[in-house]
Image (cartoon, rainbow, N blue to C red):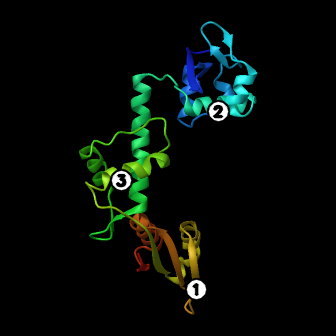
Amino acid sequence: MGKTVVIRYKHGGENFELLADADMAYEYVTGKRTDALSVLQTEEVFKDAKKGERQSEERIRKSFGTTDLKEVVEHILKNGDVPITTEQKNKLIEEKRKQIISLIASNSIDPRTNAPNPPLRIENAMNEAKIGIDPFKSANDQLNVIVAKLSAYLPLKFSLAKIQVTIPADAANRSYGTLKHYGIKKEEWLADGSLRVLVEIPAGMQTELFDKVNKLTQGRAETKIVEQ
């Protein structure tokens, strides 16, 4: 059993506290642990954990709409104050930063050139804009706010790209699964055995798609952007 921490949550003027294992609580908020109850040292919801004073069922039901311990604990872990060390917090911020950069790079293009934004360019713009990362919010939940701040430093356009890909006959079968993964909207098997498909992907993933099909066909694939 590791170090015990008190996780606090306040709602409607009432205190709700949990006694939890510090490392397990960190694993839960970072998504590495999914069982909320497993982080608890004691399966109780307290009004004052240090004094051992339990919170009443009536107040729990009023605040959470249920007395189911699992649901209540999940809510407190998601919305409460989970103590973490400075090292854990910095690690979590860095992980979220990488996730956010990946999301922006995969889904956006530079509207001036219609080319994907490289991750390093996005990272540099985030540093220039002094964008802060919330270690406890998911990357998706922070994305819109961050993009709004980032747009003053880096032109961004979020869109889907429709790309026509033609694969030579001798590589068609081994390439089909990869193309299907990206989302085939239309497919056509040509008379010579080659495969022509229309895929629709986030605009920022064009380079990734081109690299994949060129590797599968030794550079013999034909690609054409139909719409962006």
Q: Which one is in front, 16 or 97?
A: 16
Q: Quadrant of residue 117?
A: bottom left
Cα separation between marks 2 and 1: 48 Å
Of the residues tagged 1 and 3, which is closer to the observer?
3
Disc 3 and disc 2 in contact, CB within 8 angstroms: no
- Disc 3 marks which residue? 148
Mark 1 nearby-residue class (10 Å; few <14, some 14–19, many ≥20) = few
In the image, 49: left or right of 156? right
Helix, strand or loop at mark 2: helix
In the image, 112: left or right of 48? left
Report the disc number at residue 74. 2
Counting residues from the N terminus, which is met first, the one under dot 2 or under dot 1? 2
Seen at 47% across and 79% down, the residue is: 165
In the image, 225: left or right of 40? left
> In the rendering, at what x and y percent does residue 193 appear?
57, 87
Of the residues tagged 2 and 1, which is closer to the observer?
2
Mark 3 nearby-residue class (10 Å; few <14, some 14–19, many ≥20) = few
204 relative to 101, above or below: below
In the image, 160: left or right of 115? right
Counting residues from the N terminus, which is met first, the one under dot 1 or under dot 3? 3
Give the amino acid at mark 3: Ala
> In the rendering, at what x and y percent does residue 107 appear?
43, 61
